[in-house]
Image (cartoon, rainbow, N blue to C red):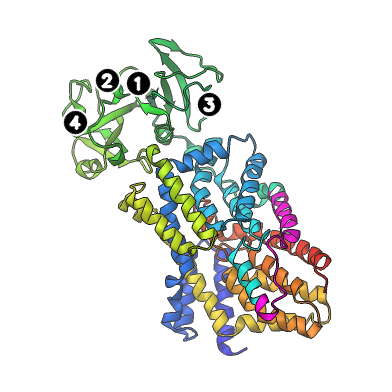
């Protein structure tokens, strides 16, 4: 290997060191590595920027828009409540998540499966009060390993099978041949996750879970006419043990039910009085079948799609001090409806319209999107702050979003369109049908994740261009060429290592000619080695940059680079041992 190859290896090692042993953001570290190689003339500026035009990176960017649209239209809420259920323990939640994800990923492209479930799992984790960091990596791992069960599970399997048939037209694999290895690997990944995740993954609680929210509100919701929760018990409707909020009482036809049993059946027109913090109010507003009590908030004229929640603190200069909300005509003057009032931690009951506002009162408003900009510097309020993700869910567009999602998955899985083309059309469909606005689509994209993908592609390209990857592979394979089993293990090790550094498809394609040369030197059949390359390329558990689904859960799970290494390296070893043990039994040398 030449000096450029050694410079590429040094850059990759330095980047890994920084990612593992420092808290420098991953995008900064990887961009720095690419920049260093560019200034050392190892790669050209065009090669350094190649990741920005990579189809895989663009696919992830577009899927952010699709995922946000699914969340805003209520699909995510429906999935988290209807399909994932309410398990009582972490192990039950992981099992309930990983089994269907692995099954879906065996027949569908795993990227849209994860894109659909990432926001659903985030909401689900909050509802069942489990750390989201204990669920996001298991989601990705289940999707990755599920793809090893069938020939169509990942594009890598199809590409390697096609290359295999070019060498020998009779050597192709059937649809379910890989299941001999894939199914045991799925079982092993699930068991490993159930046993080890609580020790190897962080258990990060949200800030409000740790310290609480001193702003406690009383809010009144009404069971809407034709509501899907009417006729269900409090527990079955998912209104028991909500994080950060509890049901205080029910007003039913003027009669108060103050000690509410979880078996109490809800009726249309029931007025449910909740006490909770700000985030809990947002969650309540998004429950399908419940609506804010209109006589409490004085219904606004603007469309629900244009409204959001805003917190304001009354200043001593507020012009309506000591007047009731109704007499001060708050809604008319500010174009905003007061949902709840918090005063020094005191729960203020009764009708909002009868409350006399005082300096320091914190109001929770439902207002037009422009309210924050209009009132941010007004002397009437000490503080004006929009509540994040507080726009109402558009449940009436859930069917439209579901149809678009199913069409995207079908088009990509059946090969009618590439994943990028299908996702691009799906995002356009979401915009046209107003499942998401242009502003929300822009805000949904996680640029840090995209920069990590682009930079890792640049580093991987440097390893490939300079011959560093091929040189390392040839040296290691040559050292075990006398033993087919040792060579098979080495092929797995190298492929999984390259898959952790560059994309799984690039790793598989890079290893294919080396694998063929090894088979020729040993005079053995190529099939067991090809199967090993397919499994190893997908066994990309140990870094977030090697596989798209790992990158997709990296931000939502609030992970560090070291979390993937701690959880993924032992798992890669386990999958490797299973593969090397089973492959020779099914496909003899």
On the rendered structure, is 77 left or right of 309? Answer: right
Residue annotated with mark 1: 348
Residue annotated with mark 4: 318
On the rendered structure, is 574 left or right of 82? Answer: right
The circle drawn on residue 186 is none
Between residue 587 and residue 568, name the one nearer to us.
587
Query: Residue 290, percent across and down?
Result: 41, 28
Up-down relation of residue 368 to residue 443 (above or below):
above
Q: Are the residues tagged 2 and 1 within 8 Å (C-beta)?
A: yes
Helix, strand or loop at label 2? It is loop
Name the residue at 75% across, 73% down: 527
Query: Residue 417, percent across and down?
Result: 48, 63
Q: Marks 2 and 3: which is nearer the front? A: 3
Name the residue at 53% across, 80% down: 462
Helix, strand or loop at label 1? It is loop
| Measured Cα–Cα span from mark 4 to mark 3 | 38 Å
């Amino acid at each position: 290997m030449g000096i450029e190859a050694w410079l590429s290896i040094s850059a990759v090692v330095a980047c890994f060191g920084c990612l593992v042993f420092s808290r420098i953001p991953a995008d900064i570290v990887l961009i720095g590595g690419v920049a260093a190689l560019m200034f050392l003339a190892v790669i050209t500026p065009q090669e350094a920027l190649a990741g920005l035009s990579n189809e895989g990176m663009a696919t992830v960017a577009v899927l952010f828009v699709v995922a946000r649209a699914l969340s805003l239209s209520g699909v995510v809420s429906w999935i988290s409540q209807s399909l994932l259920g309410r398990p009582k323990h972490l192990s039950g939640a992981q099992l309930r998540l990983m089994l269907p994800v692995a099954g879906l990923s065996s027949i569908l492209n795993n990227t849209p499966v994860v894109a659909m479930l990432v926001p659903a799992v985030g909401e689900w984790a909050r509802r069942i009060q489990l750390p989201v960091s204990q669920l996001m990596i298991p989601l990705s791992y289940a999707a990755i390993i599920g793809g090893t069960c069938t020939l169509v599970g990942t594009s890598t399997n199809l590409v390697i099978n096609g290359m295999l048939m070019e060498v020998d037209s009779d050597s192709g694999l059937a649809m379910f041949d890989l299941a001999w290895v894939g199914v045991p690997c799925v079982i092993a990944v699930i068991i490993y996750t159930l046993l080890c995740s609580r020790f190897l993954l962080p258990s990060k609680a949200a800030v409000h879970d740790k310290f609480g929210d001193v702003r406690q509100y009383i809010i009144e919701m009404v069971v809407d006419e034709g509501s899907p929760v009417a006729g269900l018990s409090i527990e079955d409707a998912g209104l028991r043990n909500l994080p950060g909020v509890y049901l205080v009482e029910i007003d039913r036809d003027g009669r108060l039910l103050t000690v509410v049993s979880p078996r109490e059946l809800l009726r249309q027109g029931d007025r449910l009085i909740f006490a909770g913090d700000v985030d809990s109010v947002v969650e309540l507003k998004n429950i399908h079948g419940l609506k804010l009590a209109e006589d409490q908030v004085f219904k606004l004229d603007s469309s629900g799609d244009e409204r959001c929640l805003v917190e304001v603190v009354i200043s001593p200069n507020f012009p309506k001090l000591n007047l009731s909300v109704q007499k001060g005509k708050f809604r008319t003057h500010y174009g905003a409806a007061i949902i709840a009032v918090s005063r020094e931690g005191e729960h203020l009951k009764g009708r909002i319209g009868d409350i006399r506002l005082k300096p320091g009162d914190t109001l929770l408003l439902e207002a037009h999107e422009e309210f924050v900009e209009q009132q941010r510097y007004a002397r009437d309020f000490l503080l004006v702050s929009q509540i994040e993700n507080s726009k109402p869910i558009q449940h009436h567009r859930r069917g439209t979003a579901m149809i678009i999602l199913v069409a995207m998955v079908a088009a990509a899985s059946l090969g009618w369109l590439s994943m990028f083309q299908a996702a691009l059309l799906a995002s356009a469909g979401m915009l046209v049908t107003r499942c998401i606005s242009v502003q929300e689509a822009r805000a949904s994209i996680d640029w840090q994740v995209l920069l990590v993908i682009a930079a890792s592609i640049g580093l991987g390209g440097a390893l490939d261009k300079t011959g560093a990857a091929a040189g390392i592979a040839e040296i290691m394979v040559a050292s075990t060429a006398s033993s087919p089993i040792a060579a098979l293990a080495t092929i797995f090790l190298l492929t999984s290592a390259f898959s952790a550094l560059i994309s799984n498809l690039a790793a598989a394609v890079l290893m294919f000619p080396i694998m063929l040369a090894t088979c020729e030197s040993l005079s053995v059949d190529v099939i067991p080695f090809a199967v090993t390359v397919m499994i190893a390329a997908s066994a990309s558990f140990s870094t977030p940059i090697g596989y798209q689904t790992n990158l997709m859960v990296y931000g939502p799970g609030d992970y560090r680079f070291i979390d993937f290494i701690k959880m993924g390296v032992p798992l890669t070893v386990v999958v490797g041992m299973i593969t090397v043990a089973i492959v020779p039994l099914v496909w003899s040398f």
